[in-house]
Amino acid sequence: MHALAPPRNYTISAGGISKDNHIRFWVNNPKYESCVRDIAASGSIEAISNLAKDVSFIFVDTRQRRLIAGRDRLGIGDVYFHRQNATMSASSDIALVLAQARPTSLCRRALAHYLRSQFLPPPYTPFEGVGKLAAGEILIAKATKSDLFAHQYKTPFYRFGEVEKLSGSVSNLFEQVYTELSEEAQSDPWLFLSSGGLDSTTNLIAARKAGRVMSACTAAFESEAFDESVYARNVCEFANIAWRGWRTPHFGLDDLRSLVSHLSEPICDRAYIPTRWMLETQTPGLLITGEGGDEVWGGPRRWSNHITSLSGYLQRIAATPQALRLALLEDEALIASVDEEEVSEAQDIAQANKARTLFEEAKAYQAARWLPENVIRKDTSAANGSVAFPLADERCVQFMSSLSADAHERGCDDKAFLRAYLDRQVPPETLSRPKMKFKIPRDIWLSAELGDFVLDQLQDARSPFAGLLNTRVLADLYRSPPKDDRILWGLFTYLEWVNESLERSRGLN
């Protein structure tokens, strides 16, 4: 998806009315331009919520003193906002909001959430007073002569048990999804990220059935324990699809800083490193990824049958153990309140999606948070062109939502639906191999130079990061072998992204 126009800051204030060019808007997909104008002008919350499933937008009517913003269901387009007294501003570029907000400090609670979740959950950004919309959320702000009123509304990802069941099989469903995608991108070449796993292989087989000419690529590693290229190559040879493996090099500090500069937000996912490097010199036209396969077609991340509560599930999937977060932040009350806030938010998400079982509660949280804020953000940041996520298509979500709770869980167990779809269409080892995820060897990026850089940033009294973390504990993490290299990469991207955003905002003042 591409922005219709360069990002700008959209603002309304109590008491001010502009008579010229009073309607202005931004949308991250040009085909929705007229929809955004008409639907936002109508003011219908239901219509605006439905629009936010598909597209991110910001709409301002200064005569009506109204600002309406929405973020798409997959979180592909960002919407940041800042309120100061009776003025509300919003932009797709955080630097534009920072230029107006001029935050004086970083948000310690946001950092605590980041350490816990591996990404920044909405409404948090690293900066005090600057927020972001959640995926599928809308913001409506109305100014009067003397004050401003703002409300936020969530759009559920799933609507368990409410959606009319789609007719036909999973095979028919994929035929609809991939045929329509092919019609929308008729002239664009397609490039597939392929690991040889179930999700990316489903994409390849379904697209081939739709008659699409395509190619696939895989990040390869010297270490056989991490390398998935042999599986991806075998699938592509079996299906007669052009394939290329990209051998991943070792990265120095400057290389990593360059990679981070393309991130739309800081994330701890180290898979971004080879993905961005692999795609940096390619112009795929349309990049197809398997993200959404876990959140729509699989069981909840790190799901275990012995989990008996939503809070227990959230503790299990925490990226950083509570004890380590406490040692790094040295604030027991903050850690406890962040954990409580995460549980409360997950319960709200489950209720909005009308989840009927703990399994569905966990799935709803995973789809609303982990999918848009981490895995999809990784691929949209890495890509040079447009990105598509067919396995998270609205019709796929609708199909899964319409199933009974038991059928939903059975179909997601070991991705039974996808395995049945691929049966006899791929090499047998594709269906029998255990899930590897996409892990990368730490030696291609982790170095003493990177550790020194992070520690220097956190210890420099002139840095905005000074005093945020216990650097003695962090220095222990960098000792060889590191105890948790995910934290090290996550903090590096956090520091770099914050510094670059502040620097860009200063250039706009």
Image: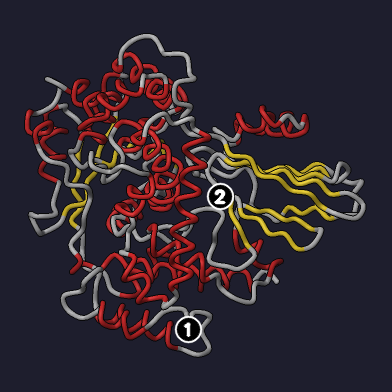
Q: Is residue 348 left or right of residue 200?
A: right
Q: Which numbered disc covers residue 78?
A: 2
Image mark for residue 492: none
Q: Is residue 339 left or right of residue 435?
A: right
- Quarter holding the C terminus is bottom right
Can I make out residue 58 in this image? no
Q: Quadrant of residue 423?
A: top left
Residue at left offset 47%, top offset 25% = 184
The three-letter amino acid code for the residue at tag 2 is: Asp
Depth order, front residue of 160/357 = 357
Image coords of residue 239 (percent x, y):
16, 26
Q: Which amino acid type is shown beneath numbered disc 1?
A: Gly
Spatial CA span between label 1 and label 2: 29 Å
SS for callout 1? loop
Q: Is residue 257 above or below residue 263?
A: below
Disc nearest the viewer among 1 and 2: 1
x, y percent for residue 118: 37, 59
Q: Residues within 10 Å of mark 2 (few under 14, many from 20)?
A: many
Residue 298: x percent and y percent?
Answer: 28, 34
Q: Closer to the camera, 193 or 214?
A: 193
Are dots 1 and 2 in contact, CB under 8 Å?
no
Report the residue at 77% width, 29% height from top.
42
Residue at which label 1 appears: 467
Residue at the farthest bottom position? 461
Q: Position of residue 400 (x, y in %)?
A: 37, 24
Looking at marks 1 and 2 on the same chain, the residue that comes earlier in the sequence is marked by: 2
- Write the residue at 61% across / 54% down: 80
Look at the picture and state if 459 lies above or below 251: below
Q: Residues within 10 Å of mark 1 (few under 14, many from 20)?
A: few
Q: Residue at x 21, y 58 (%)?
A: 440
Q: Is residue 77 visible?
A: yes
